[in-house]
Image: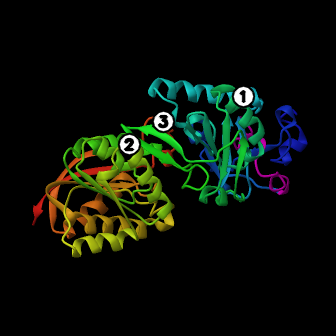
Amino acid sequence: MNSTSPSHDSDPASTGPNDRPIVRLKPKAEARAIRHGFPWVYADELVTDRRTQKLAPGALAVLEDSDRRPMGLVTVNTNSKIICRMLDQNPEAEIDQPWLEARLARALALRERLYDAPFYRLVHAEADGLPGVVIDRFGDTAVIQPNAAWAEAHIAPLVAALIAVTGVTNVLKNATGRARSLEGLGEETVVMAGAVDAPIAVPMNGATYLADLIGGQKTGLFFDQRPNHAFAARLARGARVLDVFSHVGGFGLAALAGGAASVLAVDGSAPALALAEQGAAASGFADQFTTRQGDAFAVLEALAAEGAQFDVIICDPPAFAPAKPALEAGLRAYERVARLAAPLVAPGGYLGLCSCSHAADLASFRNACGRGIGRAGRRGQLLHTGFAGPDHPMLPQLAESGYLKALFYRLDGMA
């Protein structure tokens, strides 16, 4: 339809290329940021008339700026605060299996250059050009998290494209978590192809991890910490190591592979600790690996009362600040972790503190950790700042894609 037609002028949700609906930015919206690569439009930036409100979650539309200039092809979800996600700067792009295959092939080429075994995050959402989509690969099995409505609507061609590009034989759809609830989507876990019926052994940093893809957290294993596991392992030779919020043994098993004398893994989940024990046995570390189930804060306090000391302590908690409203409480929680863990570090030992909260930026997190260490009466050096591995690339225009921070300190004796 010609942009000068009366119906187009009067109705922001009229049709564009390929008879797709048109949605339009408000005059004060940040059109320049979107043209420069910012992938989201927030609900208060879009004209939302009745026709726009009637679009099904995940519908495709042509995004225009307030001067009616096309900006690209977006997916629309009026149930979400992120009302539009940019899919393609070409407003006439066809979102079909070949389009999905091209995006997946680009993502696969990067991972195959980075890793010599097929265990990695294959797709990291917006940073890999597939907004809201996470795909983790475990050999010939892949787990898809379709965390945006458009991906849910395109799940069949997405699975077909994934199999065609990677050759995986088993595909699990893990449709759970906070991100889906923010999109107004339900939760389910479904095997889409092949079979997924047992924990999968994952080789990483010289250890073997057991990933429960169906019953575990997220996709069953956190690949993002791989380089931080490796750094901690360098500190762990001959050391007594405490791995707090250990999940399936992330830092602890890597430390043992790096020559640690012993590891105590602490987590609130008995199934996660059982998988950690299986991983230790599969790695040949069973005799040096022990676990303690319980609330991490309570266990840290109990260990202090027992007079326990460790040469290396790593704390990798869940996201205490998953969104801005939780930021202040989250920073207090990170400070408390540091305050409780620091006294357990032997003089000259090492403390690793992690955050996966994108709402807590690096400076805020570092300040919270510094306060906690200081209030514990300890002083030290900040040795290393780590981030997610390169299979979790950042989209430079989207700060939320760089969520993981890991700080490693060497602590002196008590002040």
Please state which amino acid type lies under the numbered disc 1.
Trp
Q: Is residue 231 left or right of residue 82?
A: left
Please state which amino acid type lies under the numbered disc 3.
Asp
Q: Secondary structure at mark 1?
A: helix
Mark 2 / mark 1, whichever is N-terminal: 1
- Residue 100 visible somewhere in the drawing: no
The stretch in magenta equals: 50-70
Determine which residue is flagged by label 2: 283
Cα–Cα span, label 2 and label 1: 41 Å
Cα–Cα span, label 2 and label 3: 24 Å
Which corner quadrant of the image does residue 264 belong to?
A: bottom left
Residue 52 covered by magenta stretch = yes
Q: Are marks 2 and 1 in contact (CB under 8 Å)?
A: no
Determine which residue is flagged by label 1: 99
What is the x, y in percent for residue 112? 51, 25
Q: Secondary structure at mark 3?
A: loop
Q: Secondary structure at mark 2?
A: helix
What is the x, y in percent for residue 182? 65, 59
